[in-house]
Image: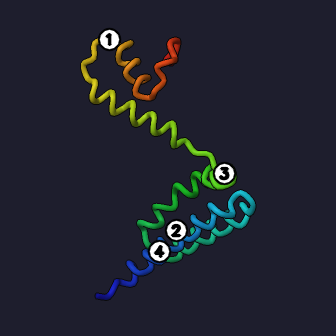
Amino acid sequence: LSMSPELRKAYELKEAYCTWFEKAKIIGSNQIAQVKQELKDYCENVEEAGIPEMIQALKPFKNWQTEILNSFVFGYNNGFIEGLNNKTKVIKRNAYGIPRYDRFRYKILLSQQLKHIQDFQVG
């Protein structure tokens, strides 16, 4: 089976992104200028390819470039907090109809193994 030229180019660009990302994770804390230049080069290659969906996918990179590059420099992320939020939302869905807020709150704290926090204030 042969691949259309546009699909082939899209695949090559996807692979180029994966290569850039893996390299950025390795060298980002020491060589952020190079990571930034390679991201710029990648974006130019996508625009030159003229694939509308891939050009649309570049918008977050342009809008959040500083934050994206900082993630390679500092290595921080909010994964832990996002995990807590997700677990809390699941409990909320499963606990629909719990009549007392304090019991709902304790259920969340217990699930997160934070039951030792008696004076935890929400808000």
**Pick the front one: 71 or 58:** 71
Q: How is the image coloured?
A: rainbow
Number of other residues with Cα within 10 Å of mark 3, as a class: few under 14, some 14 to 19, many 20 or more: some
User: What's the distance in space between the residues labelled 4 and 1, CA to CA?
Assistant: 56 Å
User: What's the distance in space between the residues labelled 1 and 2, CA to CA?
Assistant: 48 Å
Three-letter amino acid code at the position of disc 3: Asn
Q: Which residue is mark 1?
A: 100
Position of residue 63 relative to residue 95, above or below, is: below
**Residues under numbered marks 4 and 1 in contact, where contact means CB atoms less than 8 Å apart:** no
Return the disc, 1 or 2, that comes first in the chain's sequence.
Answer: 2
**Pick the front one: 89 or 111:** 111
Residue at 33%, 27% (x, y): give it: 92
Tag 4 secondary structure: loop
Return the disc, 1 or 3, that comes first in the chain's sequence.
Answer: 3
**Residues under numbered marks 1 and 3 in contact, where contact means CB atoms less than 8 Å apart:** no
Tag 1 secondary structure: loop
Q: Which residue is mark 4?
A: 50
Number of other residues with Cα within 10 Å of mark 2, as a class: few under 14, some 14 to 19, many 20 or more: few
Three-letter amino acid code at the position of disc 4: Gly
Residue 7, located in which quarter of the rendered image? bottom left
Residue at 58%, 51% (x, y): give it: 64
